[in-house]
Image (cartoon, rainbow, N blue to C red):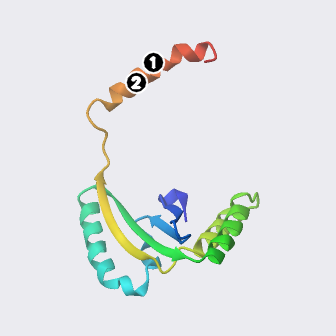
Amino acid sequence: MNEELGQVYTILTDKTGTLRVRIMCSIMYERLSNSQSTYGEATQKHINDYADAGLRTLVLAYRQLEEIEYTKFERNFTAAKNSVSADRDELIDEATDLIERDLILFGAAAVEDKLQKGVPDSLTASTNLLRPASRYGC
């Protein structure tokens, strides 16, 4: 997982204790299960069309995890995130590689990456409202 590339993952459990990893990123195609090639190709075409239209794209994929897999991942990932060594990013990548494989394609989406009308003015007004309070340590 690479935060700079906008990858996001979530590990969920259901009522039966089943663990699932859900990954959302448009570069996850190489991590899909081989059985996903048909849908993967069609979805990749859609993603390319969306990107060509100037939209921000998102691919969702998931897979089921065994408890032991999750435990190993959590231990390695926590150690990597807390590392102060020069190879911290590589350690994080190694930890996430344990679960970011054989993913099942869930779908894709695209959104226009543009502020709605009036948002810049609202942000400016909010900032101006907060400035006087910050003078008094609030």
The x, y position of residue 120, in whole percent, is 35, 30
Residue at left offset 55%, top offset 15%: 133
* Mark drawn on residue 124: 2
Q: Quadrant of the N terminus?
A: bottom right
Q: Quadrant of residue 56?
A: bottom left
The x, y position of residue 14, in whole percent, is 50, 66
Q: Quadrant of residue 81?
A: bottom right
Q: Confirm or deny contact between disc 1 and disc 2 (CB under 8 A).
A: yes
* Mark drawn on residue 120: none
Residue at left offset 60%, top offset 14%: 135
Residue at left offset 48%, top offset 81%: 102
Residue at left offset 30%, top offset 58%: 110
- Which residue matches tag 1? 128
Q: Is residue 42 above or below residue 107?
A: below
Crowding at dot 2, Cα within 10 Å, few <14 / some 14-19 / many 20+, comes out as few
Q: In which quarter of the image is residue 3?
A: bottom right
Q: In this view, does 33 lie above or below 136?
A: below
The x, y position of residue 92, in whole percent, is 64, 66
Crowding at dot 1, Cα within 10 Å, few <14 / some 14-19 / many 20+, comes out as few
Q: Is residue 7 above or below residue 73?
A: above
The x, y position of residue 53, in whole percent, is 23, 58
- Amino acid at circle 1: Asn
